[in-house]
Amino acid sequence: MRKPIIAANWKMFKTRDEALFFILKVSEEMPDNNLIDTVIFPQSPMLRCLITRQGEELKIGAQNIYYEDEGAFTGEISGPLLKSYNVEYVLIGHSERRQHFHETDEDVNKKIKAAIRNDLLPIVCVGEKLADRENNNTNKILKKQVKKAFKDISAIELKSIVIAYEPIWAIGTGKTATAKQADEACGYIRSVIKELHGEVVADDLRIQYGGSVKPENIDELISQENIDGALIGGASLDPDKFIAMANAPLKILK
Ligand code: 13P
């Protein structure tokens, strides 16, 4: 049984006061983290502030990490700094970082290694463009992204990793993948991991779906066989919606 994980990627939204208001409102309403992991990814300057107020159940994660531990890399964020702030999770390889900041599969691989080295839990994002899907290249793209991301990552190291399948055409567009499409892609990702590390590792790996998830569609998505949670953008900015989505897995655990 894989533990569901519901995460809010706030991207470049929310000021300090808005973030604090949100945390105050949701922290008492989060599910027991023995049953469900819930994580918020705010902008980096908010990490410290939210970590001191996160409550018992909620985890806080960083939206980015640099692959070197220190050095002359102006504007980047180091793993040791994140760890020293008790940050637990880090997002790696989000399609917006790949698209706007030209992150490559090789960068993603180096960032995963940096996260593991610093005892942070990576959520690694993969996903195809609309043209890839229309040309029947979804699996080819996913296989390439997964293989390159996890090059030289051991089976033991994979235990701390979550993969987020986020088809780019479904991000921020209101166009959710159907539950069947999402499940098939997550199942395919699981089969690639099985090829690399065998059945036990693949069965244990948690895979989230992301792309226009909202309270109205989360139940169907997370009840699919291969989907273990959601990575949510837009709808996660609203505290009431986030509370509803964070608690959604309770319905399938019962
Ligand atoms: P939306 O939920 O706004 O489509 O964003 C998904 C996403 O990119 C989460 O990382």
Image: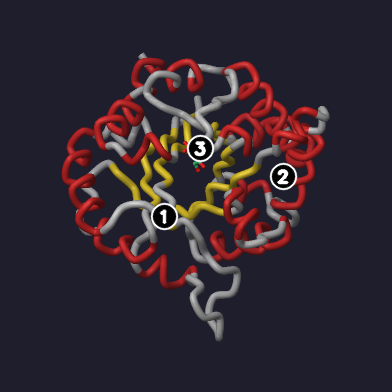
Q: Using a 10 Å C-alpha cutoff, classify the residue at mark 2 as few (fewer than 14 neighbours), some (14 to 19) or many (20 or more).
A: many
Q: Are marks 2 and 1 in contact (CB under 8 Å)?
A: no
Q: Are marks 1 and 3 in contact (CB under 8 Å)?
A: no
For the residues labelled 1 and 3, the Cα–Cα distance comes to 13 Å
Q: Provide the secondary structure element on which disc 1 rests.
A: loop
Amino acid, disc 3: Gly
Q: Is mark 3 within 8 Å of ligand 1?
A: yes
Amino acid, disc 1: Met
Residue that label 3 marks: 172
Numbered badge on residue 54? none
Q: Residue at x 58, y 51 (%)?
A: 96
For the residues labelled 3 and 2, the Cα–Cα distance comes to 23 Å
Residue that label 1 marks: 12
Q: Is residue 67 left or right of residue 23?
A: right
Q: Residue at x 53, y 47 (%)?
A: 123
Amino acid, disc 2: Val
Q: State which tag comes first along the sequence, 1 or 3.
A: 1
Residue 223 position within the rendered picture, expressed as x and y whole percent measured from the top left: 49, 17
Residue that label 2 marks: 146
Question: Residue 199 sits in which quadrant?
Answer: top right
Residue 117 position within the rendered picture, expressed as x and y whole percent measured from the top left: 56, 65
Identify the image quadrant of the C terminus: top left
Q: Tell me if residue 51 can be seen.
A: no
Residue 213 position within the rendered picture, expressed as x and y whole percent measured from the top left: 46, 29
